Image (cartoon, rainbow, N blue to C red):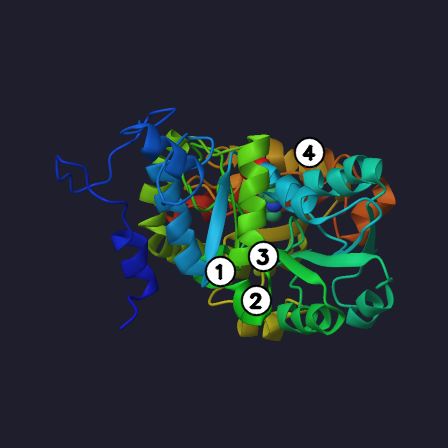
Amino acid sequence: MNPKFETQAIRTQSERSQFLEHSTPLHLTSSFVFEDAEDMRASFAEEKERNIYSRFTNPNTTEFVQKVVQMEGAEDGVAFATGMAAIYATFVAFLNAGDHIISARAVFGSTHTLFTKYLPKWNITNSYFAIDDLDGAAALIQPNTKCIYVESPTNPGVDIVDLSALGALAKKHGLLFIVDNCFATPYLQQPIKFGADLVIHSATKLMDGQGRVLGGITVGKKDLIRELYLFAKNTGASMSPFNAWVLSKSLETLSLRVDRHCENALQIAARLEQHPSINWVKYPFLKSHPQFELAKKQMLKGGSIIAFEVKGGLEAGRNFINAIRLCSLSSNLGDSRTIITHPASTTHSKLAGEDRLAVGITDGSIRLSVGLEHPEDIWNDIENALHQ
Ligand SMILES: *Cc1c(COP(=O)(O)O)cnc(C)c1O
């Protein structure tokens, strides 16, 4: 019998050392020793599975990777220093000069910069389609199109992308289907079930969940991950063993934490929706969300992020943020602490005004990452700020 999600998150552990420790220790070592000349040769020839050097593998990073692999229903994975390192490496490992990407318009700010500033150096181009326009997506496919890339829910608009429809489109045209699953976490959504070839996470967010360390990971099929691993070990954006140790511990409580994040977020979203100072609220598991049915089909719960707009535009948005006392003003998300961000002036400030509007970021939009404080305290802070 296959152990269930919660059990795997706790019981997937690297081999015990001679000390028979119960909790996995931190393996802070740059390299590992060989027994003799033959062991050295055979290890480098990959005739045995073992650790050689922590840029390649380390027991802590392997444990973290294996947990996420099981959670996502993948075959293998590679850990990276940050989420952006994972995204960058995944593109550069699989794309060649002249290739073309199609992606849903709403992507993380730095991913947009990668598409528009850095990948074009190799003549790798990108076309955006609107979240709900799958015919438009199909129409963008050219002979040099190599992959479809999406986030769902999107950052910061919490729109939902139809993963199974895009999975089928990718399969039909022989394209790689790559999903940034950061907002959902593998607890709420497993894109491989819907046809994704590669799934990427910024582990910095809900996987850590306490705003301590940066990390990234890509998981998927064995042959693809082998290619990505070779790229990663030779280019060096490896995850540190310390961060992997922290993250692996964090995954033990992922389901518990995400359950509570979702409970709190749904409560806050429902209350925001009733408040007279709010123009609109978007949360995937509110009936008013335009893709509510699709969200329920793809996700176990609605996640921790709410997007909303305070009435009165930019000025009212700024006043609201300045009146916040308990919640943090920060650009991170998926933390135990509730975090409020103004995307137009921070995470998405590099987008031109019309590009921001196209992904639903108005000047007054607020992104709320609902934390694990008591929901009454979170609500009191927000309500007080709305009265200012
Ligand atoms: C934060 C984030 C990233 C980048 O992750 P880092 O760990 O900060 O590099 C990528 N995608 C999404 C959706 C994110 O929220």
Dot label at residue 266: 1
In the picture of the structure, the residue carrying the numbered disc 3 is 198
Q: Amino acid at mark 2?
A: Leu
Q: Quadrant of the C terminus?
A: top right
Q: Secondary structure at mark 2?
A: loop
Q: Amino acid at mark 3?
A: Leu
Distance, label 4 to label 3, CA atoms, is 29 Å
The residue that appears at 47% across and 67% down in the rendered structure is 300
Q: Position of residue 144 (x, y in %)?
A: 84, 57
State yes or no: discs 2 and 1 in contact (Cβ < 8 Å): yes
Name which of mark 2 and mark 1 comes first in the sequence. Answer: 1
The residue that appears at 36% across and 36% down in the rendered structure is 51
Answer left or right for 64 relative to 202.
left
Query: Which class describes the residues within 10 Å of circle 3: few (<14), some (14-19), or many (20+)?
Result: many
The answer to whether residue 46 is above or below residue 36 is below
Q: Nearer the viewer, mark 2 or mark 4?
A: 4
Q: Amino acid at mark 1?
A: Leu
State yes or no: discs 4 and 3 in contact (Cβ < 8 Å): no
The residue that appears at 49% across and 60% down in the rendered structure is 266
Name which of mark 1 and mark 3 comes first in the sequence. Answer: 3
In the picture of the structure, the residue carrying the numbered disc 4 is 346
Q: Position of residue 214 (x, y in %)?
A: 49, 34
Name which of mark 4 and mark 3 comes first in the sequence. Answer: 3
Q: Quadrant of ligand 1?
A: top right
Query: Disc 3, ligand 1: is the CB inside 8 Å?
Result: no
Distance, label 2 to label 3, CA atoms, is 29 Å
Dot label at residue 365: none
Name, please, the residue furthest toward the front: 38
Q: Secondary structure at mark 3?
A: strand
Distance, label 2 to label 1, CA atoms, is 7 Å
